[in-house]
Each structure stands twice: as C-alpha cells, then as structure tokens.
Image: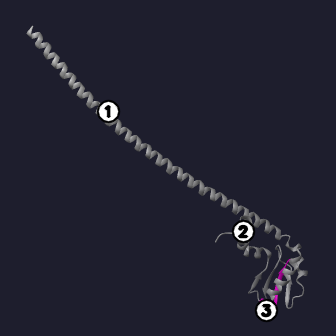
Amino acid sequence: MGIEKLTGSLVGEANQGAQEIVKTAQWHVDQMLKEEQSKEDELKGKASAEVKARLEAQRNERLAWARLEAKRVIAEAREDAITNNLESFFEELKNARKAAAYKSFLEKSVAEAVKELGGACTVHVAKSDAAMLGKLHDCKVVTDLEALGGAIVESEDRSVRIDLRLETLFDLGRDGLRKEVHDLLFGKRKE
C-alpha cells in the first residue's frame, strides 16, 4: 500500500499544483482581459471624441457654406431687383418726350452747351424735337438724331462734341441711380 499512498499523494500534490497553476494562469488571463478591455474602452473613447470633433467641424463648415450661399442668393436677388428697377426706369425714358419738363430740359441743356462751345455749332436732334429748341444764334439744327431724346451739340470744326442724349445721361448717372434705388428698396447703406 505504500506505493498507492505515495502515488495518491503525488497525484494529489500534482493536482493541487496544477490547480494553483491554473488559478494563477486564470488570474493573469483575467488581468490581461481587464487591461485589454481598458485599452479598448480608451480607444473607443478616443475614436468617439474624434468622430464628434469631425462631425462638429463638418457641421460648422456646412453652416458657414450655407450662410455664405444665403448671402450670395440675397445679394443676387437685390442685384436683380435693382437692375429690374433701373431697366424699368430706362423704359420710362421712352416716354420722356411726352413730359412737360422735357421741353424745358432740352432748351436749357442745349443753350448751355452752345454757350460752352462759344456760339457757332451744329445741334443734332430728333425731327420731333427740333421745334422745341427755340431760336439758336449761329447754330445749325440737324434732325438726324435717333435716340430716346436729347441732343448732340458739336463745335463748328467738329473737334468738340457734347452728348446730351437721354441714354448717355442715364448711363452717366447710373451709379448714382443704383445707390438711390438701393436706398429706396433696402434702406440707407451703413458706411
């Protein structure tokens, strides 16, 4: 029986040693799992923070783009409104000859141009406007002007020309008119 006891004792000790090794190994595995879980949680946290940061950056970028696009659309709409008003104003110039103030404008502006040129000159007007000029000393009136209204006054030697056509005056005053139309439609500009 001694051998059986000895064998049983050795087997028991071996089992006990094996159980200790298994317990230690299990404890190390649990520690490794905890460390890996901690690392995984840390990586997930970093990834989540990075995703949030990127989403916030994209959100801000898209909001900035949307604001910029909205400003562009508003600016285009304002520009269209101003342009449409200027075009309708230009269309109204076609009816300028019918206005009572047109005769006075034509007489006064042509007289000033003739005076500026020093007398003898040629005045180009539309046929229907020739009668409105009144008497001009030393000036030749030519009814060859094809315009919405107004006149062109030339010096006798044709070296100087004063363009008083309504289209030209409109073009010269366009920037000022744009500002006035803007102020009327959208209020005064802050400068």
Which residue is under mark 2?
183
Residue 12: x %, y % from top left = 17, 16
Secondary structure beneath disc 3? Answer: loop
Q: CA distance from mark 2 to mark 1?
A: 73 Å
Is 124 part of what is drawn in magenta? yes
Residue 184 placement: quadrant: bottom right
Nearer the observer: mark 2 or 3; the answer is: 2
Quadrant including the N terminus: top left
Quick one: 90 or 189, which is closer to the camera? 189
Which residue is under mark 1?
33
Q: Is residue 20 left or right of residue 54?
A: left
Label 2 vs 3, first from the N-terminus: 3
Quick one: 32 or 154, which is closer to the camera? 32
Residue at 44%, 43% (x, y): give it: 48
Q: Amino acid at mark 3?
A: Gly
Nearer the observer: mark 3 or 1; the answer is: 1
Res 127 seen here: no
